[in-house]
């Protein structure tokens, strides 16, 4: 997913000298080619995420299209004040990229587990929030955010679903990867891989589960949510994130605001807690009951 992001960013920088990448002392090997090609469009600011965001705001005020990059919570929560006051308030063209959504850096502990970022950033006015589930979605997302208006957040994941789409990518839309009448699984981020695996296992049990990648959390695809509520036996949201304020909350808001209430509703994710253990991304998903096997069991219980 990160490689797809960087390939597209390289194309954008080659076509537009106003595209500028800032990194907080990370990605040396990853960005060597970018730096050599565009020495005036790349700056390593050191371990100083607040300063990086302030610098991004200054560059954006001068007409630059700025991308800030770091891992997990560092380009988001550590510099939240600068994002809110300097970036969002002035509606600047800044794209914040976090490589390592959810449990991507699971072995490094809760300081590196990005499990509240979606909830916090989607609450900010003038902020777009995108969590792609495939490499193709990540590539399309960075182009849409850089060419769009306002501050955007791109949440990259180490897990990636092996899916492609012939559809056009738009902020505020979603992609249906699987049809199903019994229940609709709405996922965001790399956990789309586990969601599709769960749908395949459910099919073997006679449960027809649709799968939709809700890559755009803000703005969100209200039509897809309403269709799922109206046309299938229930909605299950799946996210590598706390269920409070994340995708599940956003979907519930749409259902209540629109008056289209699903027959069944379940949010799968971290249940109002921090991850207090360490391990691989897959290990933590299994531990917190959000891998494919756990998703199947929880949906079976929901539909009984």
Image: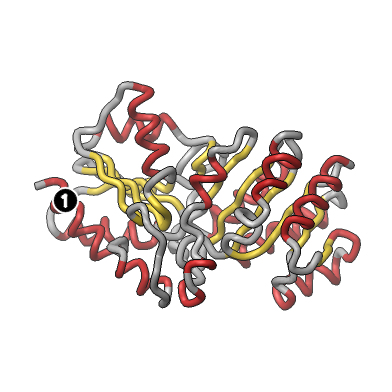
Which element is circle 1 on?
loop
Front-lying residue, 113 or 224: 113
Crowd class of label 1 (few under 14; some 14 to 19; many from 20; radius 10 Å)? some
Left-right relation of 88 to 21? left
Q: Quadrant of the N terminus?
A: bottom right
Q: Residue at x 16, y 47 (%)?
A: 302
Q: Name above or below for residue 169 compared with residue 230.
A: below
Number of dots carrying numbers: 1
Task: Please give the residue where the numbered disc 1 appears in the rendered image.
Answer: 207
Q: Nearer the viewer, residue 161 or 276?
A: 276
Is residue 28 among the parts visible in the rendering? yes
At 48% from the left and 53% from the top, the residue drawn is 116
Q: Is residue 206 left or right of residue 64?
A: left
* Residue lying furthest left: 304
Residue, x 85% and y 71% (percent of image)? 36
Please name whichever residue, 108 or 144, is drawn nearer the observer in this view of the structure. Answer: 108
The quadrant where residue 162 appears: bottom left
Indicate how the structure is coloured in the image: secondary structure
Position of residue 21 measured from the top left corner of the image (x, y, whole percent):
78, 58
In the rendered structure, the answer to whether residue 140 lies left or right of residue 60 reads: left
Q: Position of residue 55 (x, y in %)?
A: 83, 52
Nearest the camera: 60 or 206? 60
| Residue depicted at x 69% and y 60% | 69
How far across and down, in percent of the image, does residue 296 sit? 21, 58
Question: Can residue 148 be seen at all in this image of the molecule?
Answer: no
Give percent across and percent down for residue 232: 23, 36
């Amino acid at each position: 997913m990160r490689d797809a992001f960087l390939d597209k960013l390289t194309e954008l920088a080659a076509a537009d000298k106003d595209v500028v990448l800032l990194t907080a002392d990370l990605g040396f090997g990853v960005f060597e080619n970018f730096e050599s090609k565009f020495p005036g469009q790349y700056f390593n600011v050191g371990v100083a995420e607040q300063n990086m965001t302030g610098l991004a705001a200054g560059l954006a005020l001068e007409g630059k299209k700025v991308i800030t990059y770091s891992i997990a919570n560092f380009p988001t929560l550590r510099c939240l004040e600068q994002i809110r006051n300097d970036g969002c308030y002035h509606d600047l063209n800044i794209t914040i990229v976090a490589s390592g959504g959810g449990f991507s850096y699971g072995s490094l502990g809760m300081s590196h587990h990005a499990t509240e970022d979606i909830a916090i950033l989607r609450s900010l006015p003038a902020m777009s929030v995108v969590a792609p589930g495939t490499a193709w979605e990540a590539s399309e997302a960075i182009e849409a955010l850089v060419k769009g208006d306002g501050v955007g957040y791109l949440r990259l994941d180490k897990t990636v679903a092996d899916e492609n789409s012939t559809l056009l990518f738009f902020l505020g839309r979603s992609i249906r990867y699987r049809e199903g009448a019994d229940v609709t699984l709405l996922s965001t981020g790399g956990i789309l891989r586990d969601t599709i695996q769960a749908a395949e296992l459910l099919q073997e049990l006679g449960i027809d589960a649709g799968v939709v990648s809700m890559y755009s959390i803000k703005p969100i695809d209200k039509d897809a949510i309403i269709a799922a509520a109206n046309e299938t036996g229930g909605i299950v949201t799946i996210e590598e994130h706390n269920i409070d304020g994340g995708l599940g909350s956003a979907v519930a808001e749409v259902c209540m605001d629109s008056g289209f209430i699903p027959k069944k509703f379940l949010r799968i994710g971290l249940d109002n807690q921090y991850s207090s253990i360490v391990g691989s991304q897959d290990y933590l998903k299994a531990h917190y009951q959000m891998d494919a096997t756990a998703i199947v069991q929880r949906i079976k219980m929901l539909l009984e």
